[in-house]
Each structure stands twice: as structure tokens, then as C-alpha cells.
Amino acid sequence: MSRKVLMGLYDTPDAAADAVENLQGASVESIDYDILSGTPYPEGTFGEPPVKHKLYVFPLVGAAIGITLALFEGFGTQLAFPMVTGGKPILSVPPMIILCYELTLLGAILFTVMGIIFESRLPRIVRGLYDKRITEGLIGVVCTFDEGRDEEITKCLNDAGALEVKSEE
Amino acid sequence: MQDRKALTDKQINDTLTNSILRTPLHWYILTGFFAVIVLMGFVAVGILANRGLGMTGMNRPVYWGFFITNFVFWIGISHAGVMLSAILRLAQAEWRRPATRAAEVLTVFALGTAAMMPIVHLGRMWRFYWVFPYDWARGIWPDIRSPLVWDPHALSTYLIGSSLFIFVALIPDFAVLRDKTTGMAHQIYGALSMGFRGSVRQWRLQAIAGIILSALLLPVFVSVHSIVSWDFGMAMAIPAWHTTIFAPYFVIGAVHSGVAGVITVLILLRWLFRWDDFIRREHIDALGRLLFVVANAWLFFFALEFMFGLYHQEGTEVVVRDLWLFQTPWNVIFLLFIFTGYIIPVPMWLFRSVRRSFPLMLFTTILVNIGMWLERFLLIIPSMGRKHSFTFVWGDFAPSPIELMIVTATFALVFMLMLLFAKAFPLIPIFDIKEGNVLRDEIQIGRRTVQAVIREE
């Protein structure tokens, strides 16, 4: 069965929250609707469930890779050109600590950014249903549904006071 | 304290993208002026590369001159960006909103400028890549025991981290520009925004990203200037630098000059782009109070550093302080540094009327940076000039026109880059200002209506 998309545009968060409530009442799964806004609102403003993500894994992985590279560089350069200075061991620990510190953080930062882009589902080649007025303050409630439920979903969106209901065509 | 005007999202978009979509004439004049100075700087660098370091004032025993002073200065300026953005974001300070991106961008450009200085200072600039561990054919690797090898690691980490921090926060603003433009600009901003739509998931991740990146960048911010200070503190040949106070002293000095630099930039941007509704008196008042605390902390470390050198009666350290206090022209430079870096501006910041005055804050923050540049100069040159116990190998330093030109060009470069950035991207984060509107309310307490901020737990 093919899927269709509709978007209702609202000028207040309350109206958008009403639309979400109507969709939840019509047994639309949370994965099938989304709320688009030009402003970040506090979590749960529109009655949506909390966002689940694994972003915290990325900095840990990046840090592990960073510290590995730092140790490789520290050990590698000192062993490749071994210099005995003042009778001290060839491998000097304090500079390796500094290298590990920096490259651990660099790895964590790089992987965090990759994680943000990945978890945000970006880059999005096909943007999907959107309206430029969203960045000017309107809030869009986008719903994906099975064919045959057009009237029901349109009613849900309109009952909440939609300024306009747009479809993908 | 909060004296903001209520603006709609559309008004915020229009005002903050105005500098990008419509360019004032004075932008072209200023950018052109700075570009000419930058070009002259590049010509000077070319002459230096062609003729060698003999064109500078450096000579035995003063091997580090204006370029290294300038390097440390610009690293210092770069520190305010992350400090303001990261610390204030983690502390959920509402007044940070208009200042963060300008501070972060200043960080990146200051860092890039600072990174150029050691390369110019090399003389044989085309050999700068030897600092990287790339080669296994020559049998020589960079010596990781040297702070001069820690420096590129720290600087690269800070530069890459700060740049990515700016980019991630810019994604929603790219979406605004994508929606406001047509043609080629629309395509470019569309590509940069990567299809950002402002979904709940994307905004939530933006907020978490800000927190995680702030938490990761703060340790980098502390480490970078500590490592730069160890270029001096761990230099075996210069006894006057053998003090463990250098790391915190340099970091606090960096914050002092960096925050002053941010205030200067904010006031100039406010005037240039008519951002009176966004950069308000409350912001420079808050920054002024922060600067007052930081300046006094800096004075404490400066006093410690001064006294430590005298306390153990180390000859080379005593003679440097003698130079600072009693020998002309060093005592004149020292007095200038103390007056501009602390004595004039800091007592002025005690007064609310001064902190809320844009002209006076511009004046005091420029003074601070003059003082802090001279502080780095006084730290580096006299110590090298008096590093030996035998007076017949003492030397002095006088900058050459080439050095003066290159250092001047670095200031022009940073201002020019800021102006170019402001032409292409919003220097005040649009979504951050809008979020501030959402989280703001007015409440009635007795007879008074006060502005309140909603905090999300």
C-alpha cells in the first residue's frame, strides 16, 4: 500500500500540540508524524515522545581512536629514532600524556560531530514536505499515513486550527 | 537587567540576515581598506622569504621577536570564544546568546592568524611540514619531547574543534538562509544546511551537541595556552622563563585579552550592522563584570610571576625585572603595559555607567589588548636579551619595518575575515535568539513586572 504525506501549518505551539494530540487519538504512531519548527522548543512541547538516540557512543569511540593514534605516534616516533638523553629511558612519558590528551579530545570532537550529523539523519538529499514559512515562525506537523486515510488525517490537522494543509504534490 | 524588545521570528530573520542579503557601503570600504593592508603584509612576507630573517630585528641573543609575541597574543585572543560560548552555554546563561558566534568566529580566525606566525618566523617557511610525523625516508622524526611539537597538536585540535563547533551551530541558520535566498545562493546554503528541516529530533540533537562539544572544548581551551606557555616554561636555555606559574598565568591572560577582544568586536559589529536590538547594554555590562573578575585574577598571577623571579635571587631573573623597572625604554613600555592593561580600564569597570556605555567599553577593551600585547613583548624579548650570565653577550631588539608591517597585517587580516564571514553567514545565531524569545516571559511581582527566563531541567 502506498504512503501519503500531509503537513498542517500552525502559528502557535498550542495549535501544533493540538494537532499532534488529534493524530495520536487517530492511532498514528509516533514514527509517522513529525513537528517542524524554526525555533527549538523545550522537549515535549508538542506532546511528542522523547527523542531516542545513541549520540553518547560517538565521542567515546572517537576518544578511543584518538588515544590509540596518540600512543602510536608517541611510541612510534621515539622508537623509530631512539635517543638516550641523560641516561633516561627512550620512551618519555610526560610528552606522551600531552599528545594523548590532545588527540583523545580531537577524536572525541570529530566523532561527536559525525554523530550529530548521522543521528540528525543528515544529509537529507530529498527534503520532503516542507514550507519556507517554518523558518519565519510557523510550525509544521507532518504526517505520513497509508492511502485511504486522507480525510481522517486532514480532519485531524484542520480541527487543530491549521492555517493551511499541504500535500506532497 | 533585561531590556530587550519583543521581536517576531520574521523580524529576527530579516534583521540578522540583512548584512548578508543587503550590504552597506561602509562594509565595502572597510573590507577594501583591510584587504589592502593584508596584501601589503603578504608582500612583506614574500620579501622576508626571499631575503631571509636578516630583514627582521632578530639577532643573537634575541631569536624570538615580534612574530612570537604576536603568536602568543593571537592565541590569547582565541581563548575568549570557547570560554564565553562553552562555559556560558553549560551554565545556561541567557545573556550569552548574541555573543557566542562572534566569539567563536573570532577564535577560529585568531587561531589561524596565530598559526601563521611561527611559520613566518621559520624563515624557511616551506619547511613547516617537518613538524608533522610523516616521513620515514629521512630517518628523522619530530621530537615529541619538545613543546614546539605539542603546540601543533594543541593548535590543530583547538582549530578543528572550534571550526566544527561553529559549523554544527550554523546548520539551522543555513536553513534560514536557504529559505530566504534564490538561485546560486539558495543552492549553496541548501547544500550547507544538508536538508535541515527543524524536526524535533534535529533540534534535540543540536541542544545535546552544544553541550557535548562545549564540554569537550573546555579542556582543550585550558590545554592550548598552557602548552603555548610551555614553549617558554620548558625552554632550557632561558632561565628567566623557568617558572611553573606560566601555564595558569598565560591562560588567565588569554581570557583577559580574549574577552576584551570579543567586547571590542561586538561593539564594532553593533555599530556596523545596526544590531542595537540584539547587542544591548546588558550584554556588555555582563561581559564587563566578567572581565573585572578575570583582570584581577590576571593581576594576581602577574604579581606572583614578578615576585617569584625576585624571591630566589636568580641573577638572570633579577636583571630582567631591573630592565622592566629601571632601564629605558623598557620601563616606559612596562608602565604603558601596566596602565593600559590594568590601571586605567579595571577601576573604570567598577562603575555600572561605564560598563553600560558602548564608547567607554570600546575604549577600555582596546586599551587592554594594547597592554596585553606589550605584556607578551616584555615577557619574551628582555628574557632572551639577558639570558646569559656574561654581560658581553647581552643583546637588545628593535623591530624592523618588515616585522611592523606583518604584525599590522595580522590585525587587518582578522578584521577582514570577520567582515567577510559576516557577509556570508549570520554572526549572531538566529535560532539562539529565537530560542531566547521562547524561553522568556514576564511575571508580575507586586507592583513590578520583571523579565523571567524559563530553564529546562
Image (cartoon, coloured by chain):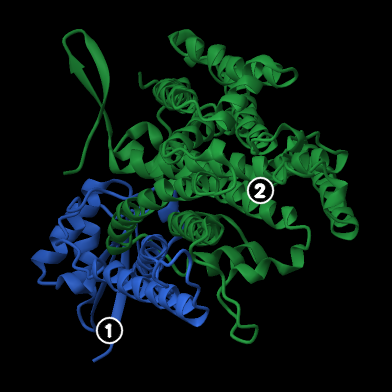
* Amino acid beneath label 1: Arg
Query: Crowding near pointer 2: few (<14 within 10 Å), some, many (20+)?
Result: some
Q: Which chain is green?
A: B
Residue A53 visible in the shown view: yes
Disc assigned to residue A158: none
Left or right: where B4 falls relative to B368: left
- Chain under callout 1: A
Query: Crowding near pointer 1: few (<14 within 10 Å), some, many (20+)?
Result: few
Q: Quadrant of the N terminus of chain B?
A: top left
Task: Where is residue B205? Give x, y as percent.
Answer: 30, 60
Could you say which is closer to the camera, residue B333 or residue B371?
B333
Task: Where is residue B269? Give x, y as percent.
Answer: 61, 33
Where does label 2 land, which residue?
B423
Could you say which is closer to the camera, residue B176 or residue B321?
B321
Name the element at disc 1: strand
Residue shown at the point (50%, 37%) measured from the top left: B254
Q: Which chain is blue?
A: A
Q: Nearer the viewer, mark 1 or mark 2?
A: 2
